[in-house]
Image: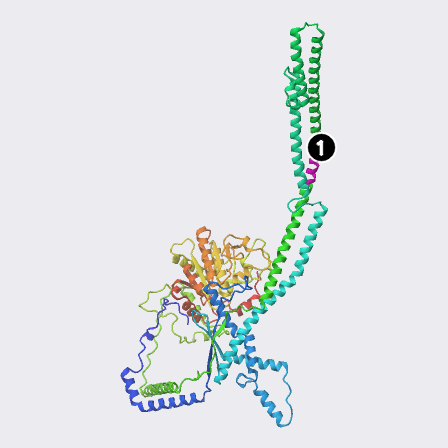
Amino acid sequence: MLDYSQPIDRARPEAAQRKPQAGFNVLELANLLWRRKVAIAAAALLGAALAVTIGKSVTPRYTATAQLYVDPRELQLVDRELTPRAQDVTGMAMVVESQARLITSNSVLLQVIQQAGLDKDPEFGGGEAGSLMSSLLGLIGLQPRAPSAAEKREVELAALDALNKHIAIRKTEKSFIVDIEVWSTDPAKAAMLANTLTNAYLAESRKSQASAARRATNDLSSRLKELRDRLRNAETALATYKAQNNFVGTQDALISDQQLSASNQRLSAARAATMDAQARLDQIEASRRTAADAGAIPEALQSPTIANLRAQYADARKKYAEQAGELGPRHPALRQTEKQVEDLKRTINEEIDRFAQSAKNDLTRARDFEASLNRALEAQKRQSVQLSQAAVRLRELEREADASRDVYQSFLKRSRETEEQESLNTSAARVIGEATVPQRRSFPPAMSLFAVIGFIFGAIAASSWFVVADLLFAGAAAPATPTPARRERSPAPQASRAPELPRAAEVAQPRQAPRAPEAAPSMPELAAPPLQPSMVEQPMIEKPLIARFQEADVIHTLGAILPTGGGVDLTRLGWPTLRPGFPMTSLLNAWRDMRAAVTRRAGGKAIPVVALVGTGKTSGRSVAALNFALAAARDGARVLMIDADHQARSLTNRVIRPGKSEPSRLGWLSIGSKDAREIKTVNGISVLPAADGDAGKAADAIHKAIVQAHSAGGYDLVILDGPAIPLAAGGRKLLEDIDSLVAVLPTSFDVNDSLEEILAALGPAERKLVGVVLDELTPAMQTRQRGRQYA
């Protein structure tokens, strides 16, 4: 019967500590065995003989071993291999392990079965039924029918399973050596199978390499036609576009670009010639306007006509000077010479005028030529601009053609390489030790070892028998000792909640059927030991408070029938919740006392943390936790309720339903998941759903949420629904963040056993237990009441 009048203490009972020691001492045991030495020796000899007999009857096994060198650094016969090579030690070890597993693959073993004919070997499950049936049919003169394909396949699978059991692969540590061990009842057959297995593995390795190269070649070849057509289309589109847009030229540059460059150079030369003609004309005009000699210009000095005229002019001037000294001014000869001088001077000026006119003509021609070149250059510039705009698409087509050409060439080259690799064997695996016919059997061991083992076991069995028999006879012969009477339980002092204790004792047993009122006082007390026996050596634990959670305290609702419109309403989840307008019930008073004890246990923390734990997979603990939070909120406390049971998720599944708005929009507090965010309710309680992941991740997320709540404030109490019992590693880690614990005990189960299971799971954390809630909302009661009360 549940008894909370005594302080809880987890020490062992005194009766268990005063249990008397039983058994022999060493001298008595030696004396007993010495008295029975003849019988023990006879039993040992009998055991040795029996072990030798068993060893002789066991079919011997012979094991042959073949050694295989599996080098992951394969031979590099071409520049690029199909598969990358292992470089580090870890990668090499993985390659060797993979090859060791390949030795016992079905493809290799089926080759061994076909080559060695194991499907017809009785040792490997083949040939027994067929030979017996053939013999029986032969006796009556009938020919046996040929086996079907399904029967052959079944025989091969049976031989495959048997051969798997006969093979053991062992890899030598820190090496590339693999030992292949095959056992058989025939030593020659064991050696043959080991050698056949190594050869089949090497053949399968070469076959797999060739098959991989063949598949790669086929895949590449199947793509070559498509790539070739793509390249042809790209080149055709490029050539067509060049012809349409007049992209004609040499490999280095287009003709239009060459013409533009030549025209630019010719225009520059024409401009230089124009400037030269202009300068020459300006110089001639300036010489004519000034009093200087007009024949001093470079053109006059270089002209032979001017030079001849100037020579004649000089001679005439000389002659005139001579005649002017000898003749008078009116002399005809002097006047004739003077006229000759003037004619020569006029002729020279006329010649110089021709030079000026020639310079004007040259300037006009140079200007006209420059203008024509300028017009041609402008036309070529416009054409170049148009070609530049068209060159954008041209370069895009060229890039597509180049890319298609590169891909096609690389595929073509790789296809030729893989085609050649089909006939190459790059594997470095080889046989370094062929299996030889074993000379000794591997099982069973030597008969001497069988004899020693049988001798030892026979002696031990006989010795044990005599010791047990002596103990039994001695116990039967000894006088029966009186068993001390059970210590009567002294009445405990009445606590503050004394009126509730008798009722708690009544609900300790499962309610099966209503009892008559007069039968209740005569119910005998259970013979089970007290739930928590006290001991003087251990410190006392504060007595937990008791609260009875009854049908009279709650009202049932159907979830989501009445829309609230303002958010999540915890009284509309479909669970039984506290009745409104009854603030002075015994349940609420008991829960107020529990919250006061939680505050004392918190040691001055601003936000104490309390967890409600319970056994079983029912939702009773979550219902009690929800009503515990509603009671605290009714008293004005700001409550944060966290679903700490990440497996059942009873509270989370009730609060978060399909079609509801995402919880992440309802609050800021998070425990690591998008959906697991704080949910504000209309009841003044914030609910934090269960976190995703394993128990460790869920515990870390809840710890983070508690730290956030402490740092941000805004709450007066944190209530945890869980963790579930039995505790996982994450749940034990979560106990460090919890200040107090409240156990929820359903009265539909044995209350004592449930509390014992909770205390055993809590371990040292049981000292944090401040209260016990006796949950009388049994499933049967809920079923009866659900049809009568709805809000």
Neighbor class of circle 1 (other Cα within 10 Å; few <14, some 14-19, many 20+) is some
User: From where the camera sits, is residue 36 visible?
Assistant: no
Query: Which residue appears at 34% of the width and 75% of the height?
Result: 16
- Residue 605 x, y percent position in the rendering: 40, 54
| 374 sits to left or right of 593 | right
Q: Report the residue that reaches farthest toward the left.
A: 27
Q: Main secondary structure of the magenta part?
A: helix
- Residue 708 x, y percent position in the rendering: 46, 53
Q: Nearer the viewer, residue 565 or 102?
A: 102
Q: Report the residue that reaches farthest toward the bottom.
A: 140
- Residue 622 x, y percent position in the rendering: 50, 63
Q: Nearer the viewer, residue 173 or 474?
A: 173
Query: Which residue appears at 56% of the width and 87% of the height?
Result: 128
Query: Which residue appears at 34% of the width and 78% of the height?
Result: 485
Q: How is the image coloured?
A: rainbow
Quarter in which the N terminus is drawn: bottom left
Q: Is residue 184 magenta?
A: no
Q: Nearer the viewer, residue 318 or 126?
A: 318
Quarter in which the C terminus is drawn: bottom right
Q: Which residues are magenta?
A: 376-385
Q: Is residue 164 above or below residue 742?
A: below
The quadrant where residue 726 appears: bottom left
Q: Amino acid at mark 1?
A: Ser
Q: Give the labeled residue for mark 1.
A: 372
Q: Secondary structure at mark 1?
A: helix
Q: Is residue 522 above or below residue 339?
A: below
